[in-house]
Amino acid sequence: MPTLRNLFENAFRPCGQTLYVWGGGWNKEDTGAGEDGMRIGLNPEWKRFFDENAGTYDYDKHRFEFGHGLDCSGFVGWTLYNTLEKEPGIPGYVMSSTTMAKTFAERGFGTYVPNEEITEYRPGDIVSMNGHVWIAIGQCEDGSVVLTHSSPNTGVQISGSMLPGKEEKTTQSYAVAEAAMAKYFSRCHSFYATRECALDYRGGNLMHWDLEHGVLTDPDGFVKMGPAEIIDAVLG
């Protein structure tokens, strides 16, 4: 059975070499997963497009250029597809970012937690905001969250998050994300600063994976690791 480690292995594969393309991962009808959203493995075109455009990219000029990159739901959908499926071309996991956490919970993948009931962010959590979706890598001791996502400003990367009352770029999650991007994705880091996500990133609903009776297991104990440990275990 697929593991939580497998989820992170796949989530980190397009990291640092895939730009945000509005509609990337979707079909042309905008009804669900397209070819890239049901692809096993990376599309080499993602890196070619990154190499050609990094540093000067304006995502607004490349909307719906299918095959060139992934948007936020395309990235999460591709990650789940590559974690849970073995063959390309079957119905995928790309859908509205806003509803992903709830829909996956309804499929039996885990437990849905509305925003007002969130008490913690666990490794692998799928977090759906209004118009965006991200994967939690883990929560730091100061309460800030390290995450991975596809963002218009940076493409697919590891990011930190802000906390109320804290100055910019002083959270533990930002330090973890900055170190990870500099160490493991140095070329991307030379083009794009590590992002510290705004407070509204904590305004979403989430799904905790059911690691005992769901579609993922956790024999490696990732759910008990800190975010820096997980990143180093997968990428180190």
Image (cartoon, grey):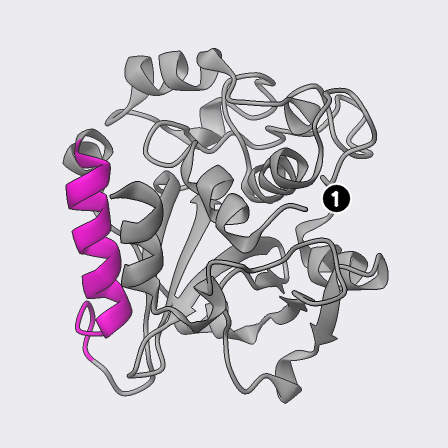
Q: Quadrant of residue 214?
A: bottom right
* Residue at horizontal 16 percent and vertical 43 percent from the top: 183
- Placement of the C terminus among the 4 image quadrants: top left
Q: Is residue 140 left or right of residue 115?
A: left
Decide: few, some or many residues near mark 1? Use Cα within 10 Å; few <14, some 14-19, many ≥20: some
Say if the magenta span includes residue 76: no
The one nearer the camera, 180 or 164, is 180
Residue 132 sits above or below residue 58 on the image: below
Give the residue at mark 1: 95
Q: Is residue 228 left or right of residue 219?
A: left
Q: Residue at x 27, y 51 (%)?
A: 232
State the residue in front, 36 or 98. 36
Classified by dominant secondary structure, the portion drawn in magenta counts as helix
**Whole-percent x and y of residue 35?**
70, 19
- Residues in magenta? 167-186
Q: Position of residue 224 (x, y in %)?
A: 43, 73
Tag 1: amino acid: Met
Residue visible at 32% across and 34% down in the picture: 16
